[in-house]
Image (cartoon, helix red, strand yellow):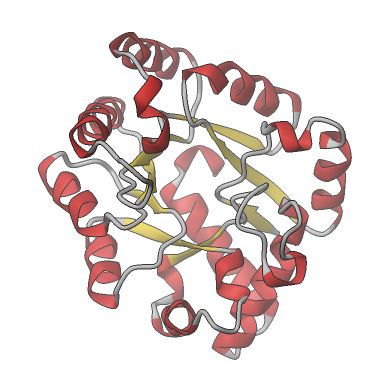
């Protein structure tokens, strides 16, 4: 059993073969997927997708790359939907200081407001933290939530330890499969396995064996095998522990 803790199954890239993708993923042992929203415009799509496919679990949030077209009423809608639906997390939320011309103040506002929603509903969060690990940590110390997942983690060991102390698991996926990703592989080998969860971020962040192709949750077993190889462990152990980690942090999966 494997859990893909970050998969945009609702994305347009899966429009023509979503049923087949889900079937192939289940066939190779991916029994659960977490599907995060990125903006108000796909809240309904995420909820519909997760209602249609057993084993798919919804998270709703406004991604930092989409805050430029967000409005205050989107936060009110998010709060209302959280009250109406069984969600596993608030997400995908966070900060992205890599994109050109980013608006740090606007990103910070929407991030902090969504952390407050997570706090008020006692939900974990799915974090986007590209080039912004320390700034995200600062916000998390200010607005305490019940933990969550630092998606696509690629920070320092010190930053990793800081997220772990705040109750977070660290997401590892396709980026770890590239031989040149030496820092990321070092983290994957040396962090406590109990701190790691697996993800694909499909249809993005394809692993090396599917480079320049659409990523898919059906690739998760091969990503898990890479983690097992790096750590010198049986695949069964990696699958068992990372799935338990996901269930521990995302209580609705249990």
Q: How many marks?
A: 0
Q: Which residue lies furthest to the bottom in this view?
A: 232
Percent of width and height locating residue 177: 62, 75
Percent of width and height locating residue 133: 26, 58
Going by the image, does 43 lie left or right of 167? right
Depth check, front residue: 90 or 112 = 112
- The quarter of the picture where residue 118 lies is top left
Depth check, front residue: 123 or 162 = 162
Residue visible at 81% across and 50% down in the picture? 26
Q: Identify the image quadrant of the C terminus.
A: top right
Residue visible at 41% across and 19% down in the picture? 82
- The quarter of the picture where residue 112 lies is top left
Percent of width and height locating residue 243: 57, 59
Q: Which residue lies furthest to the front in this view?
A: 101
Q: Identify the image quadrant of the N terminus.
A: bottom right
* As drawn, 79 above or below 30: above
Residue visible at 56% across and 48% down in the picture? 6
Percent of width and height locating residue 186: 44, 85
């Amino acid at each position: 059993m494997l859990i893909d803790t970050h998969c945009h199954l609702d994305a347009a890239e899966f429009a023509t073969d979503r049923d087949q993708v889900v079937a192939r993923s289940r066939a190779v042992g991916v029994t659960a997927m977490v599907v995060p929203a990125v903006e108000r415009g796909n809240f309904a799509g995420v909820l519909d997708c997760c209602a249609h496919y057993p084993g798919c679990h919804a998270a709703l949030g406004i991604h930092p790359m989409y805050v430029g077209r967000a409005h205050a009423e989107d936060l009110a809608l998010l709060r209302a939907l959280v009250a109406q639906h069984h969600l596993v997390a608030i997400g995908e939320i966070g900060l992205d200081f890599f994109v050109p011309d980013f608006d740090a103040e606007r990103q910070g506002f929407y991030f902090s407001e969504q952390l407050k929603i997570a706090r008020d509903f006692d939900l974990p969060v799915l974090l986007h933290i590209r080039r912004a690990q320390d700034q995200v940590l600062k916000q998390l110390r200010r607005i305490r939530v019940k933990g969550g997942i630092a998606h696509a983690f690629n920070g320092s060991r010190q930053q990793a330890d800081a997220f772990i102390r705040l109750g977070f698991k660290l997401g590892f996926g396709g980026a770890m499969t590239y031989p040149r990703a030496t820092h990321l592989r070092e983290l994957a080998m040396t962090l406590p396995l109990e701190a790691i969860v697996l993800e694909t971020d499909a249809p993005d962040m394809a692993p090396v064996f599917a480079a320049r192709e659409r990523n898919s949750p059906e690739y998760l077993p091969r990503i898990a095998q890479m983690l097992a190889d790096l750590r010198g462990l049986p695949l069964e152990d990696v699958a068992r522990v990372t799935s338990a980690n996901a269930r521990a942090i995302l209580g609705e999966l249990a």
